[in-house]
Image (cartoon, helix red, strand yellow):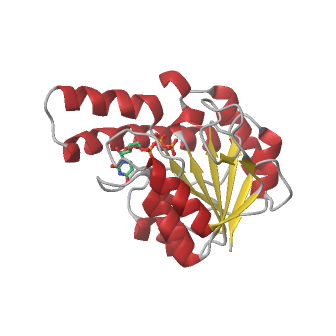
């Protein structure tokens, strides 16, 4: 497994509805690629809606996270359907355990959903990367790069083409709330893990197929590269 993809629910099921164009694009890029992949799927708005509903009903954070995890697993199985119908050599069952993913890594693609409450699929993606010794991680979300502030709120936000792990950790610390279904740039634990393992991370948008493909193939792209 050479490349780990952390695919946000914002790309798989924006507004709660699966995006078939995105799913077909990912399948096309992976089919063309010579690399092997581990994919982590986020839960997006569906995960957040269910976690928030449980919270309003009075459920604790562990339970809210457990509910959100089921959304990530549903998306994992959907990605498997998108790949297997294109005759890509993908492990047919969504996995939730890093060792099982490692064992299944004779396949071109292994897809995982969330694992345990308290973390996010960003962290799962880095842990999978560590488990299999991946050299590159590509984070696919609804923003085209990492900015010094939220580009949706601040039109003067500065885009980073390159940054180091310390800069990434500082930015993520500023937005880390650690609540079920909340959104992080790349959550703080994921940033720390990626820093300790020196996995090169690329941040691109799920709306930009060229950037996704170039990041996956190790070519120049318009997103952000995080390294030493
Ligand atoms: P994510 O936060 O990873 O999905 O998981 P997302 O919103 O699609 O993520 P990004 O930011 O776009 O990458 C959804 C929720 O599921 C729970 C957490 O509550 C998380 O916020 N979760 C996920 C866990 O508790 N453990 C996991 O291993 C994964």
Residue furthest left as drawn: 58
**x 49%, y 74%: residue:** 131
Residue furthest front as drawn: 156
Q: Position of residue 162 (x, y in %)?
A: 75, 60
User: Is 195 located above or below residue 208 in the figure?
Assistant: below
Residue furthest right as drawn: 220
Nearest the eye: 64 or 179: 179
Question: Dividing the image into four equal quarters, which quarter contains ligand 1?
Answer: top left
Q: Tell me: 97 left or right of 210.
A: left
Residue 111 seen anywhere in this rendered image of the structure:
no
Q: Position of residue 2 (x, y in %)?
A: 67, 69
Q: Where is residue 59 in the image (x, y as percent from the top left)?
A: 15, 36
User: Is 127 located above or below residue 224 in the figure?
Assistant: below
Residue 113 seen anywhere in this rendered image of the structure:
yes
Q: Where is residue 20 in the image (x, y as percent from the top left)?
A: 64, 27
Nearest the eye: 191 or 75: 191
């Amino acid at each position: 497994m050479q490349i780990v993809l952390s695919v946000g629910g914002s790309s798989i099921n924006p507004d709660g509805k699966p995006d078939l164009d995105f799913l077909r694009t990912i399948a096309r890029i992976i089919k063309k690629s010579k690399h092997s992949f581990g994919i982590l799927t986020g839960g997006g708005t569906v995960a957040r809606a269910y976690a928030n509903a449980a919270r309003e009903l009075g459920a604790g954070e562990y339970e809210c996270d457990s509910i959100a995890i089921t959304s990530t697993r549903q998306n994992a199985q959907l990605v498997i359907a998108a790949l297997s119908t294109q005759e890509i050599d993908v492990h047919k069952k969504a996995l939730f355990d890093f060792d099982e993913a490692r064992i299944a890594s004779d396949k071109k693609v292994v897809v995982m959903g969330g694992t345990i409450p308290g973390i996010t699929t960003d962290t799962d993606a880095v842990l999978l990367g560590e488990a299999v010794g991946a050299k590159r991680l590509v984070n696919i979300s609804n923003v085209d790069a990492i900015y010094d502030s939220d580009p949706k709120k601040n039109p003067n936000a500065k885009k980073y083409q390159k940054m180091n792990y310390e800069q990434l950790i500082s930015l993520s610390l500023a937005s880390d709330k650690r609540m079920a279904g909340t959104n992080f740039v790349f959550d703080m634990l994921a940033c720390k893990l990626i820093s300790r393992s020196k996995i090169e991370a690329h941040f691109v948008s799920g709306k930009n197929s060229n950037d996704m493909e170039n990041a996956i193939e190790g070519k120049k792209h318009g997103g952000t590269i995080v390294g030493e």
